[in-house]
Image (tube, grey):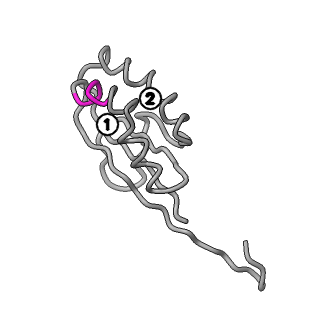
Amino acid sequence: MPKGYFFVEIEITDPAAYEAYRTSVPDIIAAHGGRILVRGEDAQPLDGLVQHRRRVIVEFDSPEAVKNFYHSEAYQAVQPIRLKASKGFVCLLTGTEQILQLSGHLL
């Protein structure tokens, strides 16, 4: 089954207000089985231009788990803080399952 990823790319417009969201969400993520893979604003472009924005990538066991997290009462209670204190987007990304085969052995 493919993994699900909660991807966030935002510009924080009210850092003081955003802090309440930032400190609340990790516990909500953990309660839904998520694992934060990336969290920060230090993108280092290797090619092209990258806007200075906060990016967060959270891995869940499935795309459905991302939806359950996002629509949970706990997340919906703090989502308005993010919407008021930042501009940008969040989305669900679906990972792919890849099986590598070397010398006749599956990895």
Please tell me how crowded label 1 is: few (under 14), some (14-19), or many (20+) other residues with Cα within 10 Å: few
Q: Which residues are magenta?
A: 79-83
Q: Position of residue 27 (x, y in %)?
A: 52, 28
Judged left or right of residue 103, residue 43 is: left
Residue 8's place in the image compared with 74, above or below, is below
Between circles 2 and 1, the one closer to the viewer is 2
Which numbered dot is residue 27?
none
Q: Position of residue 103 (x, y in %)?
A: 78, 84
Judged left or right of residue 80, residue 105 is: right
Front residue of this view, candidates 32 and 90: 32
Specify the principal SS of the magenta part.
Answer: helix
Front residue of this view, candidates 11 and 65: 65
The residue that appears at 26% across and 27% down in the rendered structure is: 80
Residue 34 located within the stretch drawn in magenta = no
Q: Secondary structure at mark 2?
A: helix
Amino acid under disc 2: Val
Residue pointed to by mark 2: 25
Q: Secondary structure at mark 1?
A: loop
Q: Position of residue 34 (x, y in %)?
A: 53, 42
Task: Using the numbered discs, state the Cα–Cα distance from disc 2 to disc 1 in whole angstroms.
Answer: 22 Å
Residue 39's place in the image compared with 98, above or below, is above
Disc nearer the start of the sequence (2/1): 2
Residue 66's place in the image compared with 75, above or below, is below
Residue pointed to by mark 1: 52
